[in-house]
Image (cartoon, helix red, strand yellow):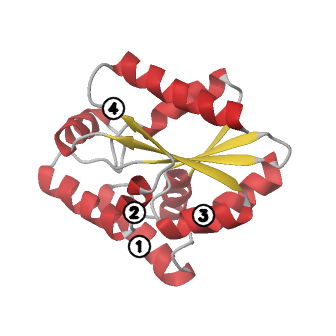
Amino acid sequence: MKLIGITGMPGSGKSAITKLAEKYKIIVVSMGDVVRHETSKQGLTLNPENVGNTAVKLREIHGNEAIAVPCLNYVNEKYKNEDFVIIEGIRSIYEVNYLGKNAKLDIIAIHSSPKTRFERLSGRNREDDSNDWNTFVERDERELNFSIGNVISLADYMVVNEGNYMDFINNLENTLKKIIKAD
């Protein structure tokens, strides 16, 4: 099995991989879902502060690989016979290292400017998003503290999501095809 990791700052367009994955019949596992699940298990409201604090606490308690370990365990339990599995939402170089030690791994980074990402998040209406600029900046800082900048800069592939949505989807699909063909 080969893992395809998706990284990018909040609102960059990481979730767009889901529709492409359906087209190619590739399973997608979201690391963010793991954090949101843990937040809910604690009885906390899903909002930017609680979800962010949960991610920090999980890493403090279980180490920097805290989100990657249950994700990979889940993948190995449920999808070990798949050729490819996409792990969406990688935020830490430690997660990359852990996943890369335990499986073949390529990383796709999706990049969008802060202004573009803020506009998207403001209109997305997910519980852990914010339409307040200061909260947005705090979330970005927290993500950067997880070392997401290192993951983005060291990614195997970079797809920019700034302009036309269909151009972005086509570029993302071409990148996915390269990875599939290379394996």
Q: Secondary structure at mark 4?
A: loop
Upstream in sequence: badge 3 or badge 2: 3
Q: Which residue is mark 4?
A: 161
Q: Which mark is residue 56?
A: 1
Upstream in sequence: badge 4 or badge 1: 1
| Residue neighbourhood size for the residue with mark 3, other residues' Cα within 10 Å, grouped as few (<14), some (14–19), many (≥20) | many
Type of amino acid at the residue the image marks with label 2: Asn
Image position of 130 with respect to 139: above or below: above
Q: Nearer the viewer, mark 3 or mark 2?
A: 2
Q: Mark 4 and 2 residues: CB-CB less than 8 Å, in contact?
A: no
| Residue neighbourhood size for the residue with mark 4, other residues' Cα within 10 Å, grouped as few (<14), some (14–19), many (≥20) | many
Type of amino acid at the residue the image marks with label 1: Val
In the picture, the quarter occupied by the C terminus is top right
The percent coordinates of residue 31 (x first, y second) are 54, 54
Q: Which mark is residue 150?
A: 2
Please state the total of marks drawn on the protein image: 4
Q: Nearer the viewer, mark 2 or mark 1?
A: 2
Q: Quadrant of residue 101?
A: bottom right
Q: Secondary structure at mark 1?
A: helix
User: How far is disc 3 from disc 4 in space, using C-alphas?
Assistant: 25 Å
Residue drawn at the location 22% of the way across and 41% of the way down: 113
Upstream in sequence: badge 4 or badge 2: 2
